[in-house]
Image: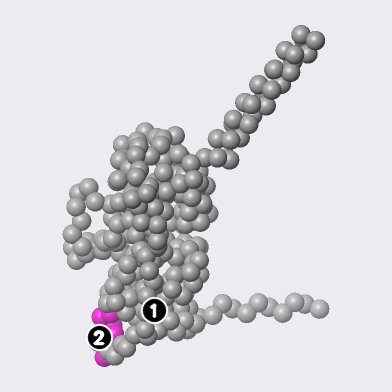
Amino acid sequence: MKSQYVVGLVGVGAVAVLVGVAGCTLFQNEHVKKGADLYAYYCSHCHGANGKPGVGFNWKLMPDPKPKDLSNKDEMSTLKDTEIFETISRDMKDTTPNVGDKIGDDEFAVPTMPTFKYTLSEQELWSLVAYVRTLHGMKLEKADWDSFKKERPKMAAVPKPLVTASSDEEAQLTGRGKQLYFNKYGCNACHSVGKTGGQVGPELDRAGFRLNPSWVYRWIKYPQSMKPETKMPNLGISDDDAKAIMMFLKTLNAPPPEKPLPASS
């Protein structure tokens, strides 16, 4: 009887350990779990499922600098929680040399890393930070979850733009739009033109043929107002910038792909 009792205790102890391990996974902090879901949806294609370089399907297609190794504790531990938050909720800056925005020495301004300031709620943004911390074995130091806004930024209806421009003005807008496309909003991180660019969004080689300009304008202003679950974040694009990008996309008129040869009988 005594041996059976001991065996029984050992069995119960083993089950308790297993339940404890599983419980850590099943009942992890609700905000970390929310952050994990957001990360998988918006970030994993570039940063990889575990934050490691070279894993995300879009990683190899991105220009330098490549996405940061979020699993590298030596580097990530040097960043404060607020610095990670400010990176994913910043306003985008034009990085064009000499003519772009003024960028401070310690200011993060990589155009191919989007902002989620205008897409996610404050609480969701902090949940992302909390999850990113787990990728390199750390925890969010402190968070007053009840004080964070839970509602996502409201998406207003975007009217069709009224754009009248001379040929010279249109050429100027097109040049400005190309600059914004690559150097401020990093559209090439997710969209390809020709043989370069990412594969998260659709190819834009023939955007001038297949996309209505006024639809393009409204889409890049507030993508969630047109498709709530789109992965494309709202980048806080101004009216003028949206018009310029629209003009640039109008010029992308690559010829259609060659028709495949008919199958031989």
Viewer-side residue, 215 vs 207 = 215
Residue 64 can be seen, yes or no: no
Q: Position of residue 248 (x, y in %)?
A: 35, 77
**Which residue carries the number 2 mark?**
169
Residue drawn where x is 26% and y is 63% of the image: 94
Task: Assign the N terminus to one quadrant of the image.
Answer: top right
As displayed, is residue 243 above or below residue 199?
A: below
Which SS does the magenta portion mostly show? helix
Q: Distance between the residues labelled 2 and 1?
A: 27 Å
* Farthest-out residue, top: 2
Residue range in magenta is 166-175
Task: Assign the C terminus to one quadrant of the image.
Answer: bottom right
Query: Is 172 covered by the magenta stretch?
Result: yes
**Which residue carries the number 1 mark?**
157
**Element at label 2:** helix
Q: Position of residue 138 (x, y in %)?
A: 41, 35
